[in-house]
Amino acid sequence: MAMATTTPGLFSLPLSPQPQARSFQLIHLASPTRPRLGRVALAVGGDLLGDFGARDPFPAEIESKFGEKVLGNLDTEHKILIPNVSALSLAQQECSPVSGLDPPMTEEDAQKLLRKVVGWRLSDEAGVLKLQCLWKLRDFKCGVELINRIYKVAEAAGHFPNLHLEQPNQIRAELWTASIGGLSMNDFIVAAKIDEIRTSDLVPKKRIWA
């Protein structure tokens, strides 16, 4: 047993011996009736791996061909499901040709799709429904830059809006399908694509008050 040590002006406690580290191992005890399954006993030793891992299948399991039921046969046909159009966002869809015989979109359907575009509103001009969006920009140069960015998006989509430079720093866009005298899905697709245009560098900067 370790003795206490003393030093003038200091107080010390008796030194206790360090506890010895102990390691444990799980030992597998086989059962005569069910091989590789049985009780688990606890023993002291240095090997901590033990007998862990996947077991071999029983003969009855092999005869039942359970692997084919779970994993499938070698000739199993695997298919990759591609999302249909309804699962894609408007900005991910492409414009399609519109026949002049197609009826324009109803106002009820247009109101539902209006929730999927940001900053756009419906306008009724002499019975013709249109989509409108307004941007207030920093200056005239920013207005011209926004028109150029919108043009690139519209050109890639093949469906063009009417763009108006109403003031030196204000742009208004209108979308509708003239061939059917109203709105089509193409108008909302292009509106969603325009929504993805970066405008943070064109709009007036917010004032930060100290």
Image (cartoon, helix red, strand yellow):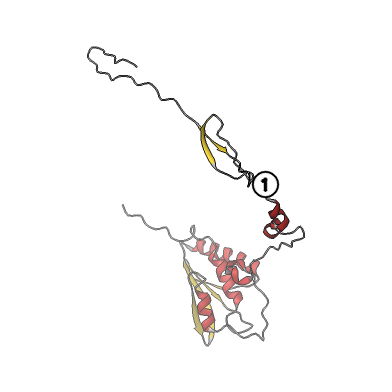
Where 158 sits versus 125, above or below?
Answer: above
Residue at position x 66%, y 65% from top? 82
Quick check: can you spot residue 32? yes
Quadrant in which residue 206 is drawn: bottom left
Where 61 sits versus 17, above or below?
Answer: below
Helix, strand or loop for disc 1: loop
Identify the residue under disc 1.
Answer: 56
Q: Crowdedness of circle 1 by 10 Å Cα count: few (<14), some, many (20+)?
A: few
Give the farthest residue toward the front.
32
Q: 201 or 193, which lies in front?
A: 193
Q: Position of residue 45 (x, y in %)?
A: 53, 29
Q: 116 or 202, which lies in front?
A: 116
Residue at position x 61%, y 75% from top? 186
Q: Position of residue 26 (x, y in %)?
A: 54, 37
Q: Position of residue 84 (x, y in %)?
A: 64, 70
Which amino acid does the dot numbered 1 rest on? Asp
Give the farthest residue toward the left.
9
Q: In this view, does 19 lie to the left or right of 10?
A: right
Where 75 sits versus 178, above or below?
Answer: above
Check the picture and name the quadrant holding the N terminus. Answer: top left
Quadrant in which residue 160 is drawn: bottom right
